[in-house]
Image (tube, helix red, strand yellow):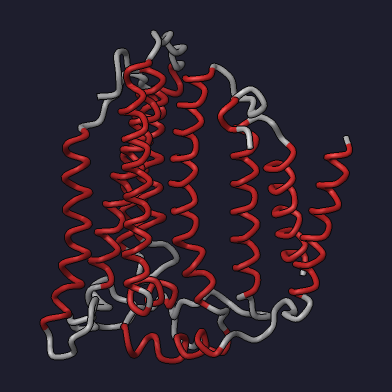
Amino acid sequence: MVRKVVYSIFLAIIVLALAMFFAAYPFGKNKMTVGEYYLNHGVAQTGAANIVTSVVLDYRGFDTLGEVSVLFAAAAGVAILFFLAGGTKREQEDLTKPNFVVRVGSRIIFPFILLFGSYIFIHGHLTPGGGFQGGSIIASGFLLLYLSYPGTRTNRDGLSIIEGLAGLTFVVLGLIGLFLPQYSFLYNFLPKGILNTIVSAGILPIIYIAIGFKVASEFAGIVDDMMCQVICRGGGK
Amino acid sequence: MIYYVGSFLLIALGLYAVIIKKNLIKILIGLDLIASGVNLLIISIGYVKGGTAPIFSRAGLKASMMVDPIPQALTLTAIVIDASEMALAVAFVVLLYKYYGTLDIKKIRSLKW
């Protein structure tokens, strides 16, 4: 009881400190100089209609490469942990069989989820969306498949190959920039094209499609590992 | 303004769950609440009064009408990273449950500090 009171006071102090700090930054104030610069020069410099995309992939492209590596590390960590735990597995009971509506409904809706996900990441430089969101949507389609057909196993080797190729595309596109006269990593060397068309913004859509495949395969792998803990008999792989 | 208050509340609730709760799953939910609160906070810092999304999707949109794109770009990746880290944390919890047969951190001896 004393513990709870002490920690509540502690929390109140933290929230108060946050509130005092943000009193200096009133809500809806004008934007920062950097954001102002990106908004004014983003279209001319990158050719992408979506300024968020040009910040993520062009101005901060190297940062995004790091984020993708973090994602890979987390997915690999999940796989390694479950692989190490394979020895102590107990016999698992069967899940309840999903009912008819779930099975048929997921079979109908699964291709549309894939289509929607790929639409999101192909149009990443034109509309709100991009590789990360589209990849997550596709992985959620896989999750639906696992839930409605508990026996499903995805082809893990295929997923690894897709993931590796997507990551390689990102890095190779970045490295090409180093051999050009501009000499910078992730230089946007392709023509910018016309604003608001699907083939525009140089290498940004290609990178976003690669990220979409990478995120989708990584999340599908995580879902596969997790479901295997519930369903598989005798170890993960 | 209400977004600031909401994000502070989310962060405080998450911290409360992390500190007070004994169940590992509830602690993870608390961590996720903190992440959501921080994301909401970052997004609402970038808001400009009356601003629209930073996408030049039609003619006539000017840069002065748009909100700050940088917080949105930061949050975009943070959400996915957060999801994958939660998956890693859940994997740890599954293993802990397998070895100890409980989720109570009081009973998991080697977690004492």
Instruction: Establish if B3 lies above or below B54.
Output: above
* Residue B31 horizontal/vertical position (percent): 61, 46
Q: Specify whether B108 is left or right of A200.
A: right
Instruction: Establish if A185 lies above or below B89.
Output: below
Instruction: Establish if A189 lies above or below A116.
Output: below
Question: Please, which residue is most extreme toward the left here?
Answer: A179
Callout count: 0
Task: Name the foreground residue: B107 vs A107.
Answer: B107
- The image quarter in which residue A156 lies: top left
Task: Name the foreground residue: A146 vs A184.
Answer: A184
Q: Specify whether B28 is left or right of A202.
A: right
- The image quarter in which residue B104 lies: top right
Task: Name the foreground residue: A102 vs A220.
Answer: A220
* Residue A94 horizontal/vertical position (percent): 42, 9
Q: Residue, x 65% and y 35% (percent of image)?
A: B26
- The image quarter in which residue B42 lies: bottom right
Q: Residue, x 36% and y 79% (percent of image)?
A: A59
Task: Name the foreground residue: A197 vs B22.
Answer: B22
Location of the N terminus of chain B (image quadrant):
bottom right
* Residue A78 horizontal/vertical position (percent): 37, 37
Location of the C terminus of chain B (image quadrant):
top right
Q: Residue, x 78% and y 67% (percent of image)?
A: A17
* Residue A139 horizontal/vertical position (percent): 36, 42
Q: Residue, x 12% and y 85% (percent of image)?
A: A180
Question: Please, which residue is most extreme toward the front here?
Answer: B113
Q: Specify whether B80 is left or right of A64.
A: right
